Image (cartoon, helix red, strand yellow):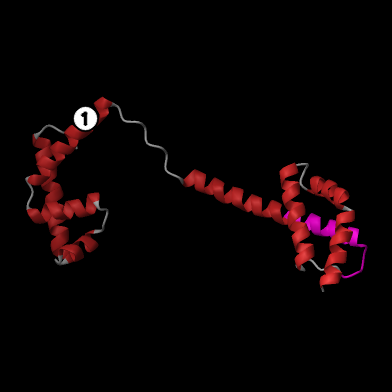
Amino acid sequence: MGREQTERERELETFHPDSFGWALTCCRFDRDEAEEVLQASYLKAIDGRARFNGHSSMRTWFFGVVKRTAAEQRRRRVVRDVALLRWWRKRPAGRPVPTPEGLSDEAETRKRIKDLLSRLSTRQRELLHLVFYQEVTIEEAAGILQIAVGTARRHYERGKQRLRTLLAKQGVPR
């Protein structure tokens, strides 16, 4: 196999300039892509992934290998680009840079909410925290707190109602 492979390599070498020209054509004259395609084609020819069966000339056969390799790379690039575009469209929008005033308002709001939450019973406060801040369901919160789901729902609703009442007393609209 070694002698046959060496002869194949020498024959491929004789039409390298023509092969590169063909790779450029198959790659829409993108030189970097053509170099990658040609290198991948040579690897296929040398390691046996592309087999020469003798039905045509070696040159014709290799040009077919280059064309198929270029098409494979183009398909991979399209799939990658589509996946990247899908990711790009789904990614969360960037957060605006907070201003000092905005940070101050946010800190004040957090403090007010913390004060209001401290006025709730421990169970109500824990349930509201789990549901709103930790984003768990009421059922999951019940499991975490080791209480019945019905009890959790009741404390959750009562906690929300108590917060509404406290906010209304402070003049905050619903």
Q: Amino acid at mark 1?
A: Asp
Nearer to us in this view, 2 or 152? 2
Nearer to us in this view, 114 or 63? 63
Q: Residue drawn at (31%, 30%), measured in percent from left and top?
A: 98
Viewed as shown, does residue 174 lie left or right of 25?
left
Task: Give the magenta part as a residue range.
Answer: 53-71
Residue 92: where, in percent of width, then height? 42, 43
Count up the numbered dots.
1
Residue 163 visible in the picture: yes
Q: Is residue 160 above or below residue 69?
A: above
Q: Check the image and name the residue furthest to the bottom.
A: 1
Q: On the rendered image, what quadrant is the N terminus found in? A: bottom right
Disc 1: which residue: 105
Magenta stretch mostly in which secondary structure?
helix
How packed mark 1 is, by other alpha carbons closer than 10 Å (few <14, some 14-19, many 20 or more), is few
Residue 94: where, in percent of width, then height? 41, 37
